[in-house]
Amino acid sequence: MDMMQTGLDPADFADSARKAVAACLGLDPAGCGARLAEDGLLGVLAPEEVGGLGLDLRFALPVVQAAGAGDLAFPLAETMLMARHLAGPAPAIAASLAAGEGRGTIAWAGTARTELVGTVGRAPLAEGADWVLVRLAHGAALLPGSALRIAKAIGLDETAPEYNVTLTGADAACRLDAAAWSALAEEASLLRAAAILGAAETSLALAVEHVTTRRQFGKPLVANQAMRHLLARQKLAMEGMRGALIRATGCGDDAVGMLARRAAFLAAATHGPLIAEASIQAHGGMGFTWDIPVHRHLRRIRTLEAQGEAPAMREAVAAALIDAN
Amino acid sequence: MMDGMHHDLSGEAFRAHVRDWLSANVPPGFLADAPGYTTPTLQQCRDFEAAMHRAGLAGITWPRAYGGHGRTLREHLVANQEIGRLALPESVSSIGKELAGPIILAIGTEEQKQRYLPAILEMREMWCQGFSEPEAGSDLAGLRTRATRDGAGWRITGQKIWTSGAAKAARCLLLARTGPLEDRHKGLALFAVPMDAPGIRVRPIRQINDKDGGFAEVFLDDVPVGPEDALGAPDEGWNAAIRVLGIERATNRMYRAWRFENELRHLVAACRQDPALAPLLRDGAYRQRIAATLVDIEMVKGNVEPVVEALVAGEAIGARGSLMKLHWSEAHQRFAALAMEILGMASPDAPPPVLQAQKRFKDIYLQARAETIYAGTTEIQLGIIADRVLNLPRGK
Ligand SMILES: Cc1cc2nc3c(=O)[nH]c(=O)nc-3n(C[C@H](O)[C@H](O)[C@H](O)COP(=O)(O)OP(=O)(O)OC[C@H]3O[C@@H](n4cnc5c(N)ncnc54)[C@H](O)[C@@H]3O)c2cc1C
């Protein structure tokens, strides 16, 4: 949908998303879902028939970016994508997800067997979820949470922990074909780039705050060129990530656009973790404490990098270039 | 399409015009990634660049009154994307076309625009940039070359260094001091000094890449400069110089990202030609690094395109040129090192296309050393980003 048609601007969503994310602090996933749905944020991408806003990805990016910035304890990108892509095959479920009533998530790692057995992983906040989408060799299957064995995985993210999900042969509520799954996966990787950007922005802001207030050798840390250059490097990387993401959203559906979208995720996956790590370094011992939240952003960023399978994405990017030359 | 008929084209039609013109008019042997390549001579480059201008591929945004084509910066980007896709030689007049020209358009008098600009586009006059001095590199505001009043005109005495292309230049965009040294960036003035004026001596400096016509020392001994060659007001020099540097970092050689991509494609294609290199294209570790290069290139594109939009919307370039310059220069160095590493594993009896690639990438690798030095070093860019993009307090 066109901005001219709707009169909407993606930037407007950034503001309400920031407020909603702040209001979610301390709420459990069900509470977060209800709060986010109040502002229509879960249905940004879902078609109007299931109660969504039917907007394109550009409107979801600032929302997910705000979620990354605020370390939101809710599988926001997963819910948005499920509400969009399940609207055809399972409209009632899509509607309940967009309304913040049903809870869904996606297992990003591994492939279940067609007869719906096997274990898949990297499903954020799967415990207590009503629905989990799992990848198959061709497409994906939606399974009721009650029919799955769900176990917490060894993961970095403590706010939105990842779970392993074991299928027990129960029937799928619906399936997505391969084309629908790959569309969903491609959108997911841009949303991840936005979430990483948000988390990196907060990390850098915290570092700037720290070096301007903490004093050593009789002056603020920021008086030292080494610290100024360290932070300038992080800013450089962050603006590069942002530029790649903006560029990707303006590209078409051809090979150029495909490369731009993959590069947007890879730029974030490459530089995002380094920004959060540098922020910890700039904090000194403070950076190693539980209370300073930079580690939470680092945990989130590293988890998103893994969910997006950055090395496999790099391989795909290289393959496309090498095969064409 | 014939010369002169390109004015009504827009968007994709303009892109098609640029593409078609280049494929029909690039002289044989000009493309560094094609068979039969020989380093073009200065004269061949001048002739080709003059033809590019006639065809609407240079002076794109300059007003038609001064020989330009009166198009938008978006079209300048489109043309540069197409120019970048081909392994063409670097412009031999980018200082004139991309630094002197825009600043003359901004602060020159009508008479100066008429006199300087068409000569730049028609490749009759090349320019050099006389900013750096032995005592004033990163600390440009410490420059000592002095301009003193002589009737209505000026007399200039001092020394410039690292002046690229000084030996072939007809004019020098020269920054000189009109007030005392303690005034730092106040009391600086910009001049368009004719390089054949009495009292100018150019001494070439041998560069690490042994390139002909590289940088030089320029000695100025009581050089007379008429009032018609003073650019802007006598105290406007610093602001004008900052603008020049902004352009140099942000919009100069806008084809960079696309040329960078051409270089990467050339590297891959060359690897295919050598039994010792082809397996590297199947090696997972090299594939990851090739992908990382592509991501870097996409980030260069993602940096330049919004700047074009911002400038079209009337915003100033400001400090974001530092983000752009720092990213591409370092990304290009990373890539050049990768190319050297890969091509260093070529067979001793590698076929001609591989030898040609080795030669091209040796030049690129050496040239890339300069990219983190000129137009403000990496450390200076980091300082600007800290001060003016992050707005960090000084912390005193
Ligand atoms: C190939 C090439 C072409 C050039 N062409 C031109 C030209 O046409 N016209 C022109 O006017 N100039 C030209 N230059 C000059 C260029 O602009 C200067 O070399 C550059 O500004 C650096 O100045 P410098 O060489 O005096 O190095 P210096 O300023 O002495 O710097 C030396 C090192 O110290 C670092 N440094 C300096 N100050 C600081 C600081 N405050 N904090 C931390 N580190 C610092 C620098 O980053 C650098 O690593 C060219 C240079 C090259 C390499």
Image (cartoon, rainbow, N blue to C red):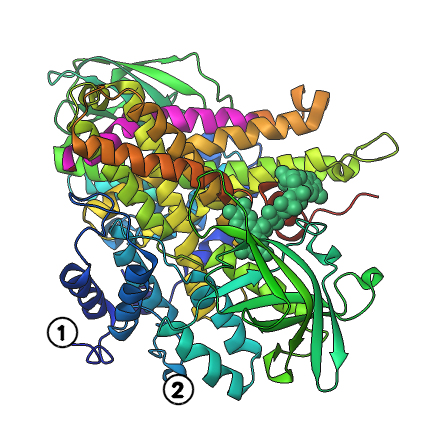
| Cα gap from disc 1 to disc 2, whole angstroms | 23 Å
- Residue B122 % position (x, y): 35, 74
> For the point 43% across and 70% down, which residue is it?
B312
A193, A8: nearer the viewer: A193
> For the point 45% across and 25% down, which residue is it?
A302
B267, A301: nearer the viewer: B267
Q: Is residue A319 magenta?
A: yes
B314, A276: nearer the viewer: B314
Q: Would you say the magenta stretch is mainly helix, strand or loop?
A: helix
Tell me which amino acid carries mark 1. Answer: Met
In the rendered view, does A179 fall on the left or right side of B236? Answer: left
Q: Which residue is mark 1?
A: B1
Specify the quadrant that holds the N terminus of chain A: bottom left
Q: Chain of mark 2?
A: B
Mark 2 element type: helix
Mark 1 element type: loop
State the extent of the magenta-drawn residues as a range: A296-324
Q: Is residue B87 magenta?
A: no
- Residue A133 % position (x, y): 25, 27
Numbered badge on residue B65: 2
Specify the quadrant that holds the C terminus of chain A: top left
In the rendered view, does A240 fall on the left or right side of A235? Answer: left
> For the point 17% across and 32% down, which residue is it?
B352
